[in-house]
Amino acid sequence: MGTVRATAAAVTVALAAGAASVAAGRLASDAALKAPPGRPLPTEPRLTVHATAAGRITLTRQLASLRPGTYGLAGDGSHAVVGPVLTAAAPSADTVVRRLERVTHGTLTPGDHVWLTPNLYVGDPGAALGLDHTDVEVPGELGALPAWWVPGARDTWVIAVHGLGTTREHAMNLMEFLHRLRLPVLALAYRGDLGAPRSPDGLNHLGQTEWRDTDAAIRHALAHGAREVVLLGWSTGATMALRAATRSPVRDRIAGLVLDSPVLDWPTTLKALAAARRTPGALLPLAVRAAQGRTGLRPGPEQAAPSAAEPLTVPTLIVHGPGDEVAPWELSRRLTARHPGLITLHEVPDAPHAAMWNAAPPTYEEALRRFLTPLM
């Protein structure tokens, strides 16, 4: 009898441990599958505002606050734009001073917790940039998808698709540049975004199913005067663009791809986000398995990178760098090496995920201009 009880107790403990591991894996997978649009990714640290003055803001000194370039600075109820680090102005070894370009809304006071974001602008293209635009609805498979359309004289449209942790406001970083090139821009909100339908399971599929909304945007553009389109995507938006280029029934109308920080291997990205939430390393494979079970995602042939069965045939510009902690730069290098002459890789050092433009706007825009010119 004692042996039976001991065995039963051991089985109970094992089952409880297994159930706990499954629950832990499920919770860890939420870092990617439930990443809310417009909120910081787990890899983005919270910073404290220490002081503000005319044209200056003092923040906690971290690698993030020392990044080169121009960024949005978001808090709960506030948004500002900060420029370069003012190297001669730091009042202590624990702080850093950056140029404060403007406060878009709200206030910044000492003690506030904020984070850097790629989004420089909030609102819409009219209010933020003074650009004429139209609010349109793109018919998607799950329902109407809100989008901004900024008109241009050319019949090649740019369809802009944001990624993890941002909203369609991210596209406004490049709208003035694209407007100067006279390119119409369609900036899409897709499933899970504010005002757009939810995915059936309420989860983010890291571009693996959301790409169908990009396909819907292409069809909308073609039905409203576009001859061809260029897909411009950040993060999982780049994943969506890449999948559309190899799977869309109208992919022959895609003139080019611009992929900023593309997520080419969703398990790697999911593990990076889960690890940033301090998930123990031993649980990271469980997070991947939990994501597979919850969403039907599969690694291998179902990843974003083109396969022999679905080859990439579209001229592509990848903008990426080794500072990306979410989507490994090395995967972009490998993809470029597999498609010599078709893919151009523009490296941006010292830039976080999906913020390649923020780190060096002039060189980013020049690389983009060179790529787009033959396609217009």
Image (cartoon, rainbow, N blue to C red):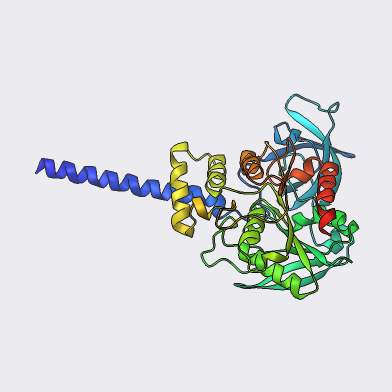
Quadrant of the rendered image containing residue 204: bottom right
Task: Give the x, y percent position of residue 368.
Answer: 81, 49
On screen, 165 above or below 247?
above
Question: Which residue is farthest left?
Answer: 1
- Taking 20 as reference, is 279 left or right? right
Task: Give the x, y percent position of residue 297.
Answer: 49, 56
On screen, 319 above or below 240?
above
Q: Residue at x 85, y 58 (%)?
A: 128
On screen, 97 above or below 147?
above
Quadrant of the rendered image containing residue 351: top right
Residue 192 seen in the figure:
no
- Taking 352 as reference, is 23 left or right? left
* Nearer to us in this view, 110 or 249: 249
Quarter of the image where the N terminus is located: top left
Quarter of the image where the C terminus is located: bottom right
Q: Residue at x 75, y 54 (%)?
A: 170
Task: Give the x, y percent position of residue 36.
Answer: 62, 55
- Total labels drawn: 0
Residue 250 seen in the figure:
yes
Quadrant of the rendered image containing residue 186: bottom right
Task: Give the x, y percent position of residue 180.
Answer: 90, 57
Q: Residue at x 52, y 52 (%)?
A: 30
Question: Which residue is farthest top?
Answer: 93
* Nearer to us in this view, 352 or 23: 352
